Amino acid sequence: MTNKSDLTLGRRVMAMIEELARYSDEPGRLTRLYLSDAHRAAAEATLGLMRQAGLDSHIDALGSVIGRIEGSNPDAPALLIGSHIDTVIDAGRYDGTLGVVLGIVVAEALRSQGIVPSCPIEIAAFGDEENARFPTNLSTSYALSGHYNPTWLDSVDQAGIRLRDALARFGGDPAGIPALVRDPKRYRSYLEVHIEQGPQLEAKGLPVGIVSAINGVTRARATVIGEAGHAGTVPMAMRRDALAAAAEMVVAVEHTGSIRTDTVATVGVAQVQPGAINVIPARVDFTLDARSPDDAVRHAMVNDILAECENIARKRGVSLTIEPFMDSPATPMNRNLMARLEEAVTGAGIPPLHLASGAGHDAVAMAALCPVAMLFVRCKGGISHNPAESITVEDADVAAHVLIEAVKKLTSC
């Protein structure tokens, strides 16, 4: 394990995170949305940190901050390290930012140790991972892997501002998006460090873990139609209560998501009409979010959920429509990269734990460019997307040492 008396790297990580946490769109809490004034300020600060670490750095056409060390052979395929600096509303300070500053710490450590990597290393601070402002999907990282959707530019936020207009105000350039696409032949791998956003590492007493896959996701909108009636006059046996039917469906979703290994299923939104205390509900709209690191398992789970909900609808005499609107495949991590991370974890005296990621990450987009791998860092209580999000300086130090050792192995030949 890392020497507890020397937490230099961990303290450096935490200091940079504190620096970037200053930049928020809202006083009193951390909210840093894509292309906002706070995003621009955080991007400029990140640019400064990269340059201090000796990286040749710039802010690209979509607002990502990119830094590069050429290495002894600038023509060799590069290693990418990255994560994001945008946040959800009222966020914690470690989600995304931890991975960015750890990449910078790697560059600083190599420089201080006089190590020149054999290949270029790039650090990427993406700006649109959370998709909390515009209806996009990992837009800034998909731009690098060649899968930016041009229709995103005409999407609008809740204030009616078009993304292309926000980008121009930020200082970006829609015309520069095609030039962001990387050549797969020029990149050997992508590494991302992220807080776990779950409780498994804490439960095992481990500071870090190795991601095995990022879950695939199915999302759908469901509508249950029953019949409104007076709450005091319609006998129970004669009702077609849309909410009672939907409630039974929600329980079926929960049960079906719990009976397989590594699957989850959630109803996160439900809207009841007409919504009066003395009226039997006539309509309920609800959402489904189903996830698994195995696509075949996920599809089987979703089919079971649909069958259960249809049976409930028939039994209760209501109509049901379910419209899927997302089917994002699972992203397995590269086994060779996982092995390098495992060697670094074991070398730090830590038992290696492999675990799936239930949340999406920029690594999903980068997998279209090159092999990817992720390292998770323990977070207190498994809490994320919350101001209570927390890691320790000791765990930050472990993560820094593990990442540095993995990078040395990957760039030594």
Image: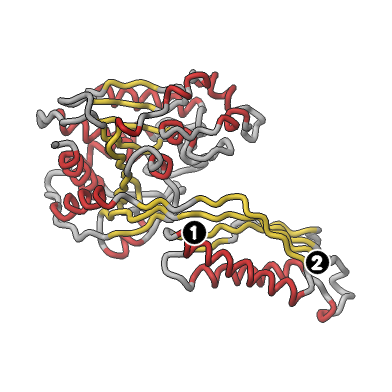
- Kindly state the secondary structure of the residue where label 2 is placed: loop
Three-letter amino acid code at disc 2?
Gly
Q: Quadrant of the C terminus?
A: top left
Given residues 279 and 332, the one toward you in this image is 332
Label 1, residues with CA under 10 Å away: few <14, some 14-19, many ≥20: many
Image x and y of residue 133, in percent: 56, 36
What mark, if any, has residue 291 been given in the picture? Answer: 1
- Kindly state the secondary structure of the residue where label 1 is placed: strand
Q: CA distance from mark 1 to mark 2?
A: 29 Å
Visible residue check, residue 17: no
Where 281 falls versus 329 (above or below)? below
Where 367 falls versus 319 (above or below)? above
Image x and y of residue 199, in percent: 37, 60
**Which residue lies most toward the front here?**
185
Three-letter amino acid code at disc 1?
Arg
| Residue drawn at x 37%, y 54% as measured from the top left | 213
Sooner in the amino-acid sequence: mark 1 or mark 2: 2
Where 137 falls versus 359 (above or below)? above
Q: Is residue 333 left or right of residue 302?
A: left
Label 2, residues with CA under 10 Å away: few <14, some 14-19, many ≥20: many
| Residue drawn at x 66%, y 30% as measured from the top left | 160
Disc 2 target residue: 226
Q: Quadrant of the N terminus?
A: bottom left
Where 202 falls versus 39 (above or below)? below
Q: Is residue 88 left or right of residue 212?
A: right
